[in-house]
Image (cartoon, rainbow, N blue to C red):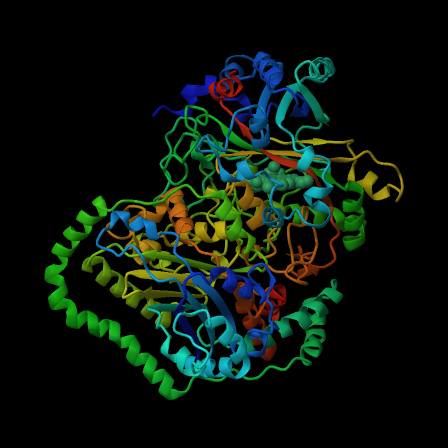
């Protein structure tokens, strides 16, 4: 089987890169009214392949993805073509149990979303990336073509130009898995008792061996290969509420420090003090050359910090690699303790993030000073991630790690940035955050308000270029 | 003295399923989640219970026997009651009859051999099935202890939350005052006779190994060849999951941090697989009893209770467990941490993903394995957990907190103790 690198002409470019130098983004969420017209129009768009992006510096990127509802409307029956992921066919908002697991409860529930559920479920996602100068014209051109194209515009989401920072003010997009484009990785075995950042291609692209060493099912007839599942969630951030709560909980001078402990990185993206630099296969970056292995009790970086939940950097065995017999004992559960082995191996639960933030930039100082009722334009993240197995990757990270109130054996808390803060299981609180302060004192803060609200979301299939052609064929 | 497990099952009369399902559903407060004060079997009134379930053993995988013509096409559909509790099965049966006789009569009245004049107590005893292997997360930790320690944690945490800025030394007297209100009955040390019995049982495995060695060692090469021959030929049955059935199953899940899990399936035909399974389950039971009784089953830490039970003269096995987290996470934990153990305990099942040398591959075929599990998972109609909201980690942590409360630590240990609250 050829390596993914050899098929770059068939792969949408966003799989490999975020195009940070194209500072403007538009996410068009469309509903299809006239399938034939929509197919014809979509066929006419030039989708940027990875080969395009590799061969020259592109100034415009167009990417297309579909929800299952979209495929059905376009006349391509995904339910009768074997191989589509059940989570994709069900949709992000389709089932109360799924919403519950993803933390989409209370004010985060799909019924309150601006888009994503019921009549507001999108069919097609069109991603446009370009320069600030060019984007307006592009947007106008596309939007004015929609009526003739048999589509209506459900939402036109714009991203501002602060690529690399999210609205709370933290550096974003620092950590990403390194994809095994050349197909040289052989996952499994004792080497994976050490955390690595390189990731099997089959964790992101369908049709390639995954971290288990197997090619998972994907849609037949060449539609699945080189495709990926794209998760889009619009997450609104209460920047003023965030910094004002921090100022009140830790004092204006302590706010930044506490915020950094909640995120698990410094504002400019460095790992927290006390995490020793460790070589990690698959990255050269100092900001990613660390794990939490030397900090099992969360003294340097809180166990429940956002980045530690989102990627605990855990290897296959927290005991690491220590020689045949000790590894054997450890595999049998005769070494170490349960609580220090509570988190699954991270390599099965990585995602590639391609989101961007929106809304005006506001510094922590401005946010703390902003009056209660000063009108603020909404800000947040158009969170986009790619993965090959929705259940094992995005849903696991979101459900079992980020929004879990039992992550790593913690209790009474959920992600300090993202939690919905509602009590669960008939009364268990989830609104606390525990950490150890810089003097080594354990701290427990209760009553965290909700800082992030889900405003929309859907699962999309991002096909390869051949797959796209097959989907759009008349 | 430790926890006991009870498994009672009776064969259902034909055509009673709709009526029985409706009756069982009246016991629930949420889909599949027992109401502790439901009038039929008010589980909440039995203080010794940890978990319990009523489940109809309808086996969706019986048609797989097409590939095993020596196995009968049909097996009876049973209604099972499975419970884990403190004390002995006889004691639990007596409690059940004392508290819920009319309800139990109505429920088991759907069984073929249960008549209006049946003596309930005798019937329950007569329909007990001894599980081949059982697992308990923490041997000897009683329901009362779990409750008391959870109550202690609750008041200590409330006190801690009320003083977010206090230093550990300032907090200590506050916590001691708060905790003083909670009753903590001393944890009884196991009686000497019990410990002697355990030691004797522990010795069974090494003794049996030594005794059987002269027989087993020479036959090992033949058994190995037989195994490999089978392994390379046994077909795999792992159909694509039905989304509809997945919705049915997941409707019953994630209402608490803990979920129930029940899976039923046939063993591969033949004496080889039968005896292999018996031997393996015996060793698992032995290991669970003597080695893995303190929070982990090998590296899996999230199981509260589990059991493996033979049905139909050993043609089928029911696996029932109570685990923390979502099903997907449970499956992943299994695959990534104890694939070898899964292969040992399930690879004699008809259609199991292909293994090598009994412990290799198998569950590592992630997709096949998850589909195989799904294919065999069945809904649990009524599931009761006596300690809602508590995970295995919570329970273990609460025990540590109690220890620190009773023997106050200082210095760095004090900080670690407070950090856990
Ligand atoms: C408004 C919502 C969010 C904010 C403000 C936010 C913020 C951040 C920040 C500041 C970082 C550290 C910088 C970096 O490594 O890029 C980060 C990392 C990360 N976040 Fe988020 N995030 C949000 C939502 C999410 C969601 C919904 C997910 C996944 C379901 C997620 C998954 C991740 C992952 C996987 C990392 C990288 C962790 C690592 O590999 O070290 N985030 N996030």
Residue at the (41%, 62%) spot, across then down:
B14
Residue B327 at what x, y percent from top left? 49, 52
For the residue pair B312 and B377, the one nearer the viewer reads as B312
Residue B162 at what x, y percent from top left? 75, 66
Q: Is residue B404 visible?
A: no
Q: Quadrant of ligand 1?
A: top right
- Relative to B218, B87 lies left or right: right
Residue B29 at what x, y percent from top left? 62, 64
Residue at the (45%, 47%) spot, across then down:
A315
- Relative to A262, B137 lies left or right: left
The C terminus of chain B lies in quadrant: bottom right
For the residue pair B414 and A385, the one nearer the viewer reads as A385
Position above or below: A239 against A70: below
Position above or below: B120 against B244: below
Position above or below: A462 against A374: above
Residue at the (54%, 29%) spot, across then down:
A461
Q: Is residue B96 visible?
A: yes
The N terminus of chain B lies in quadrant: bottom left
- Relative to A1, A310 lies left or right: right
- Relative to B39, B365 lies left or right: left
For the residue pair A411 and B415, the one nearer the viewer reads as A411
For the residue pair A151 and A13, the one nearer the viewer reads as A151
Where, by quadrant of the figure, is residue B158 drawn? bottom right
Position above or below: B89 against A453: below
Where, by quadrant of the figure, is residue A202 drawn? top left
Residue A195 at what x, y percent from top left? 45, 44
């Amino acid at each position: 089987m050829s390596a993914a690198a050899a098929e770059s002409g068939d792969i949408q470019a966003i799989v490999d890169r975020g195009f940070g130098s194209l500072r403007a983004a538009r996410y068009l969420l469309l509903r299809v009214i006239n399938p034939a017209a929509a197919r014809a129009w979509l066929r006419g768009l030039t989708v940027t392949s990875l080969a395009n992006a590799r061969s020259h510096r592109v100034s415009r990127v167009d990417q297309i993805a579909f929800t299952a509802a979209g495929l059905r409307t376009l006349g391509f029956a995904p339910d009768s073509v074997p191989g589509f992921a059940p989570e994709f066919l069900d949709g992000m908002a389709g089932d109360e149990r799924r919403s519950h697991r993803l933390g989409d409860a209370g004010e985060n529930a799909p019924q309150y979303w601006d888009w994503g559920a019921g009549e507001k479920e999108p069919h097609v996602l069109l991603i446009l990336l370009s320069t600030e100068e060019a984007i307006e014209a592009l947007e106008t051109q596309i939007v004015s073509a929609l009526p003739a194209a048999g589509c209506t515009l459900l939402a036109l989401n714009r991203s501002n130009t602060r690529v690399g920072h999210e609205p709370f003010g933290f550096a974003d997009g620092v950590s990403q898995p390194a994809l095994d484009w050349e197909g040289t990785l052989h996952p499994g075995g004792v080497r994976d008792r050490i955390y690595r950042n390189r990731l099997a291609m089959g964790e992101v692209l369908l049709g390639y061996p995954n971290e288990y060493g197997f090619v998972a099912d994907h849609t037949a007839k060449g539609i699945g290969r080189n495709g990926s599942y794209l998760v889009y969630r619009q997450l609104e951030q209460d920047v003023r509420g965030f910094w004002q709560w921090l100022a009140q909980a830790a004092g204006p001078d302590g706010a930044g420090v506490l915020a950094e402990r909640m995120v698990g990185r410094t504002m400019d993206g460095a790992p927290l003090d006390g995490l020793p630099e460790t070589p990690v296969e698959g990255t050269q970056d100092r900001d990613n050359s660390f794990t939490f292995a030397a900090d099992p009790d969360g003294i340097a970086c809180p166990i429940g910090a956002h980045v530690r939940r989102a990627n605990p950097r855990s290897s296959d065995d927290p005991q690491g690699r220590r020689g045949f017999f000790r590894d054997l004992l450890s595999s049998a559960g005769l070494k170490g303790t349960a609580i220090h082995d509570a988190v699954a191996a991270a390599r099965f639960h990585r995602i590639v993030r391609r989101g961007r933030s929106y809304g005006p930039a506001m510094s922590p100082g401005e946010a703390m000073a902003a009056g209660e009722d000063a009108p603020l334009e909404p800000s947040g993240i158009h969170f986009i991630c790619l993965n090959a197995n929705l259940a094992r990757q995005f849903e696991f990270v979101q459900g079992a790690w980020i929004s879990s109130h039992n992550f790593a054996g913690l209790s009474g808390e959920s992600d300090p940035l993202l939690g919905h803060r509602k009590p669960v299981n008939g009364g268990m609180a989830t609104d606390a955050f525990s950490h150890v302060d810089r003097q080594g004192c354990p701290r427990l803060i209760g009553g965290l308000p909700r800082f992030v609200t889900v405003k929309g979301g859907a699962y999309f299939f991002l096909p390869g270029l051949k797959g796209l052609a097959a989907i759009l064929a008349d | 003295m430790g926890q006991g497990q009870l498994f009672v099952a009776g064969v259902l009369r034909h055509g009673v399923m709709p009526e029985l399902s409706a009756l069982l559903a009246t016991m629930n407060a949420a889909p599949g989640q027992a109401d502790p004060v439901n009038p039929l079997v008010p589980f909440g009134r039995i203080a010794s219970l940890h978990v319990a379930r009523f489940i109809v053993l309808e086996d969706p995988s019986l048609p797989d026997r097409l590939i095993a013509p020596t196995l009968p096409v049909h097996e009876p559909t049973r209604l099972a009651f499975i419970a884990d509790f403190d004390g002995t099965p006889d004691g639990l049966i007596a409690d059940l009859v004392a508290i819920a006789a009319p309800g139990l009569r109505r429920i088991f009245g759907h069984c073929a051999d249960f008549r209006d004049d049946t003596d309930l107590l005798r019937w329950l005893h007569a329909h007990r099935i001894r599980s081949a292997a059982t697992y308990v997360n923490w041997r000897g930790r009683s329901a009362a202890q779990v409750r008391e320690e959870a109550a202690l944690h609750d008041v200590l945490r409330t006190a801690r939350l009320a003083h977010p800025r206090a230093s550990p030394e300032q907090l200590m007297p506050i916590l001691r005052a708060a905790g003083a209100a909670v009753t903590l009955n001393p944890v009884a040390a196991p009686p000497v006779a019990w410990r002697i019995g355990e030691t004797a049982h522990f010795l069974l495995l090494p003794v049996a190994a030594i005794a059987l060695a002269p027989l087993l060692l020479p036959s090992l090469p033949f058994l190995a060849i037989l195994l490999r021959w089978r392994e390379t030929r046994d077909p795999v049955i792992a159909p694509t999951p039905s989304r509809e059935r997945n919705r049915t199953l997941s409707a019953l899940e994630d209402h608490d941090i803990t979920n129930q899990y029940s899976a039923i399936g046939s063993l591969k035909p033949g004496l080889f697989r039968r005896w292999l399974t018996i031997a393996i389950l015996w060793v698992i039971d032995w290991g669970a009893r003597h080695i893995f009784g303190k929070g982990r089953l090998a590296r899996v830490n999230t199981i509260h209770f589990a059991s493996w039970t033979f049905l139909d003269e050993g043609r089928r096995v029911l696996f029932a467990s109570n685990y923390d987290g979502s099903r997907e996470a449970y499956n992943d934990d299994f695959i990534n941490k104890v694939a070898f153990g899964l292969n040992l305990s399930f690879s004699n099942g008809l259609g199991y993903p292909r293994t090598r040398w009994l412990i290799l591959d198998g569950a590592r075929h992630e997709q096949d394995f998850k589909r195989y599990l799904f294919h065999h998972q069945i809904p649990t109609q009524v599931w009761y957990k006596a300690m809602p909201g508590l995970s295995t980690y919570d329970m273990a942590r609460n025990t540590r907190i109690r220890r620190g409360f009773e023997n106050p630590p200082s210095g760095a240990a004090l900080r670690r103790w407070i950090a856990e609250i």
